[in-house]
Structure formats: C-alpha cells, structure tokens
Image (cartoon, rainbow, N blue to C red):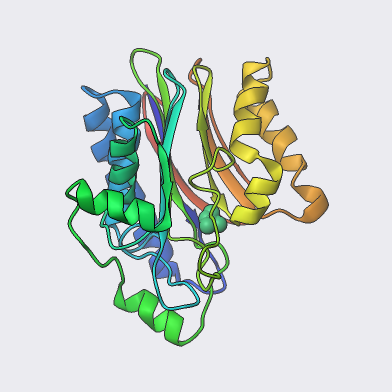
Amino acid sequence: MRILIHGGFFSESSQSIETKTQKQQALIQILEKAKLYLADHSALQTAIYATSLLEDDPLFNAGIGSQIQSDGKIRMSAAIMDGESQKFSGVINIEDVRNPIFVAQKLMDEEDRVLGGSGACQYAKLSGFDSFSTQTEERQKEFIAKKQSKGTGTVGCVVLDKEGKLAAATSTGGKGFEIPGRVSDSATIAGNFANENCAVSCTGVGEDIVSNGLATKIVTRVTDGMTLKQAFKKSFSELLPYDGFAGAIGVSKNGDVFFLESHPKVVYASYNGLENAVFM
Ligand code: GLY
C-alpha cells in the first residue's frame, strides 16, 4: 500500500516559516488519517478522502482557503481518476460547495462525468450539496492587497491499495486573480491521470501543465515500459524549453513512489508501506 499527498507549492518569498511548519504538520496528520482509511477502503475512496481533508484545511488552496479570481469570486476545480476502470470525472469552476472532490465523486456514476461552470453548480445543488462559502479572511486580505503567491497550489493524492489498484485525485482553487472562465489543469488529464500501471497528480501553473500534458504523459511512459523515475525525469525535462512551473506526485503498480518539481518547493508527504516521510 502506498499513499502520496501534496499541498501545492510553498513560496519562500511570500509565506512564513510558521506556515511551512503548519503545512508539514497538516500533511502528516492527513496522511495518518488516510493510512487508517486505506486499511478497509479502495485506492479511489482513499484518494478522495485524503483530498477532502486537504480541501477542508484553509492552509491549502483548494476547498476552504481557495484563491479568489479577478472578479472577486471563488471558482474551484477537482477531478478523480480510477486506474482500474480508467474512468475520469470532475468539476471545473464550481462555486459555493465545501468539497468539490465529492461532487467529482458523485459524477463518477453519471454518463456525463465532467461538468463546468453553472452546470456543475446546478448539478451540485440538485444532488443535495449544501451551499457553502469557502472564502477565508486570509484569502480576502490577499485579494484586497492584490497579493498573488505564484502557485500556492493545488492539492492532490495518489494511492496504491492492497489489491494493487491505483487512483488519483486533485483539487484546486486555481491561480488567483484569473480571468473568470479560465480552466485549471486539475480537472483535465494533464493534471490528474491514472490507469492500471500508474497514478499521477500535479500542481503548479495550469497552462504549463496542460501544455506538457504532464500527468497523462508520465502515466503513458510508465505503461510503455519506463520506470516511474525515468518517466518523471523525461516529462519534466520537456517543461524546460518554456520554463514550465509544475510539480507532480506519482505511484506505480509495483509500489514505486516518486515526486518532482520544476521550481522550489512543493510540500509532500508519503507513506511507502512502512513509514511516513514529509518533504519540502
Ligand atoms: N494548478 C492549478 C491551476 O493552475 O489552476
């Protein structure tokens, strides 16, 4: 069994040491809960659960604590992918729900599995999700001060369960100050992808991640025979020509875990079947 979670980029220039420690502690606590959960749940269920805990923590830019867009509104995106069924579902630019990842989970049972904008909001409402403002005082202050911390980032989780099944889940509050209607990578296969061989979740600048097709490219390379590390290295090298800003976590079916970032620093925590580790 393996679990990796990420809490997006940490900006040394705009975030305090205290925030860094808080994020590390939060990731370890979430990882501990996810480990217990994985004992009797599938990879997909655990990836969703861990991501919902990350969404609930205002330290991270997803769910509660999401960044505010240029028109003063919060629009969030989230997706899941089940490696076994190879089904992807997600919401793009959803508003006023506490956990976008749970709406993505609900969509997994629908014929139409990726919804955007007003359709996603309407679907959540009709499906019984309570209206909930994810805006925090901290983000409001940043918005008023027009402070944009590049890539404070997306959250995500990849899991290998005891049956050897893989899953990925990713959720974001976006870049902050974006043009309304801008689409994040998180609810695309560039930002979140899994099959029976590998699962990957990304963070960073959505435009750079989509340009590289990062998650799907890494998974495809592992499927075609590269090791997880080789697939990460090759795919990240392809970000270099345009100085792409991205980080990713991955797990393969043989239990390899790997993460990489093009710029410092993403916050990660991992469980390798024996012990926890936290990185930044
Ligand atoms: N990776 C989050 C975004 O660019 O929206």
Front position in the image: 87 or 42: 87
Residue 113 falls in which quadrant of the image? top left
Residue 159 falls in which quadrant of the image? top left
Front position in the image: 185 or 123: 123
Vertical order, 238 against 145 (above or below): above
- In screen coordinates, is 275 left or right of 41? right
The percent position of residue 58, horizontal first and vertical second, equals 31, 63
User: In which quadrant is the N terminus drawn?
Assistant: top left
- The residue under the point 54% across, 50% down is 203
Report whether residue 97 is seen: yes
The percent position of residue 142, horizontal first and vertical second, equals 44, 80
- The residue under the point 33% across, 15% down is 162
- The residue under the point 64% across, 28% down is 229
The percent position of residue 188, horizontal first and vertical second, equals 53, 42
Looking at the image, the residue that sits furthest to the bottom is 145
Q: How many marks?
A: 0
Front position in the image: 171 or 130: 130
- In screen coordinates, is 114 left or right of 36? right
The percent position of residue 273, horizontal first and vertical second, equals 37, 23
